[in-house]
Image: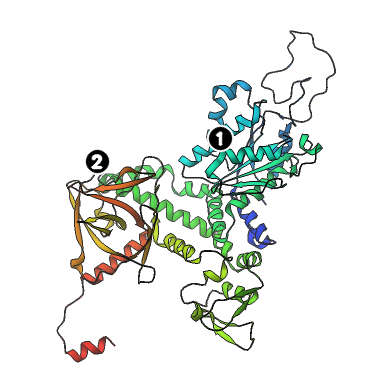
Amino acid sequence: MAAGGMSSSAHPVDSARDYADLCMRAAQEFIHTIVVVDDRATYGELEAITSLVEPGAVIAAEDSFDEPAGIAPGGASLNVAVLTDASADIGLTCAVLRPREEEQRDGTLHRRLVRAARRADVLVLDWQLNDESDGQAALRLLSDVAQEDKRGQGRLRLVCFYTSHPDLDGVFGAVERHLGEAVLSSSGPGQAYRWIDCGCMRIVVFAKAGGITADIAVPAIALEEDELPQKLVEEFASLTSGLVSNVAVASLAAVRADAHRLLTRFGSSLDEPFLSHRFYEGGPESEELVVRLVADEIKSLLDSADVRRWIEPTAIRHWAQRYLPDQIKLKPKKGERILSKVELVKVLEGGAYYGSAEVTNQVNTGNKFDLGKEYKDSVTEILINEGGDAERLDYEFARLTCLARNDSSPFPGDRSPILTEGSIVRGRNGQQVIYLLCSMPLCDTVRVGAPRAFPFVPLKVVTSADRYNLVALSPEGGQLHLAFAPSNHYDIVRHTFAGDPGGVVRSRRRKVRDREQFVFFDVDEKPWIWVAELRFQHAHRKLNELGAASSRVGLDEAHILRNAGRR
């Protein structure tokens, strides 16, 4: 199956053997490029020495990919032809950099690798580059790429050390120490499968088959060049595995595969009409219009690729076989209850239960109960492993569904949030900390020339046990439960802001201890800290609720009628 494109005859989900294979297929749809750095890279066999060469004679081009005759390699060579052919066989593009010693010293290798890595999904490094001791060159390259990825908001990255070094435990330990606090988890020492998890980055250590490692009793995963690409895809799947993650990965793959359709719809012939539209309607809203049109077209691409298949019943069954025990012990309010995996999977697959499903208690097969009544809000806690935090996971999913942005780095680079419909901000009313939701219609948040009064609806901070309808992380990272209930239009407050040269109210960056904040300043220089931005539909619904509360009609009527309507 070629990477980066859906099969026209069958969906990859239909061919998946199990959950691991399902996730691997999703990863293979996405992964495109491998960049390899190895000073022993060569095409084919090393040339045999057939004659002596007199001193001063020209023997070979210095930048040849073939190992100069008569020079014994310090480690196993890398057969570029075999590696690139094997990569192409599964739809991957593989680029190989063979650095010279001077390129390691003068920064050329650093510049090339960082630029290439921006477009690469997988990075493969030899441990000993040009015999620089203790893998120092490889560790520097790892740091360079990791820092670049961090500036790009932590892109997904698989790094593989593919080496013939005899001390793989030493290599593994040096990498782990070098990464320091970035390491979240790792394999134990002395294991053949050596891996390090750093969240968005995963590092693995493999041995070159036929290298020095193969001659000594060191547990290792040794791979030939033609075996490496497929193994890298499987490892990349460890970064992206998950039902919801598979949808995200497959969606990106679908956009890549059908990019030509997007470019056809948004061709250069539309430049003049767009510029004409911009002349009449203004800059910011015209630019936002094109972005929304592109986003809508991307949704059409995803529909065409049928990406929702990655979370349909077949995928759910694979997930359940991987993660659920044969019997699930529930924690009901009364009596012991055990649910079979078969029945739970049937409930999860079904699309029309809507929170009400009669299931059988395996303790007493004659006893049936409604799972939805037993767990009124969520069944997450019976789906996760022992010790999992169901409440936190439900909170994160809720946050994902209602918020478009809510983190300390909402935009890459120097961009910062603007004040718009659905912006949540935090400020003070005297000594009281307050949260406000911007209720200014979207069309009025642009072309802000003279100072303009923005309407806000107060949000009440409550606990998870109270009634709430919005969740967000505070600027300090704490969980917020927010209640939006505008019963009266006079609850609305107004604060006046001036626009920037682009006609929008833009926040300023402010460093606070170990994190950045984005702050709006009104015309009185009062600070309002940006917290989050609602998804467009959520923001629009809140405005609709506000409009309904504001347009209600006061009516004098008989008390008996008023009471009857409240029953």
Q: Which residue is mark 1?
A: 116
Q: Position of residue 168 (x, y in %)?
A: 70, 39
List the single residue furthest toward the bottom.
560
34 horizontally vs 420: left or right: right
Q: Which residue is more in the foreground, 177 or 73?
A: 177
Q: Which residue is more in the foreground, 392 or 359?
A: 392
Q: Neighbour class for label 1 at 10 Å: few (<14), some, many (≥20)?
A: some
- Determine the residue positioned at 77% across, 41% down: 218
Q: Position of residue 396 (x, y in %)?
A: 45, 61
Helix, strand or loop under label 1? helix
How far apart are labels 1 and 2 at the CA level?
Answer: 36 Å
385 horizontally vs 56: left or right: left
Q: Is residue 5 visible?
A: no
Q: Which residue is more in the foreground, 64 or 10?
A: 64
Give, as a three-letter code, the residue at label 2. Pro
Q: Neighbour class for label 2 at 10 Å: few (<14), some, many (≥20)?
A: few
List the single residue furthest toward the left.
556
Residue 481 occupies quadrant: bottom left
Q: Of label 1 and label 2, which has the lower sequence position?
A: 1
Q: Which residue is mark 2?
A: 501
Helix, strand or loop under label 2? loop
Give, as a three-letter code, the residue at label 1. Ala
Q: Is residue 258 visible?
A: yes
Q: Position of residue 415 (x, y in %)?
A: 36, 42
Q: Indicate the quadrant containing the C terminus: top left, top right, bottom left or bottom right.
A: bottom left
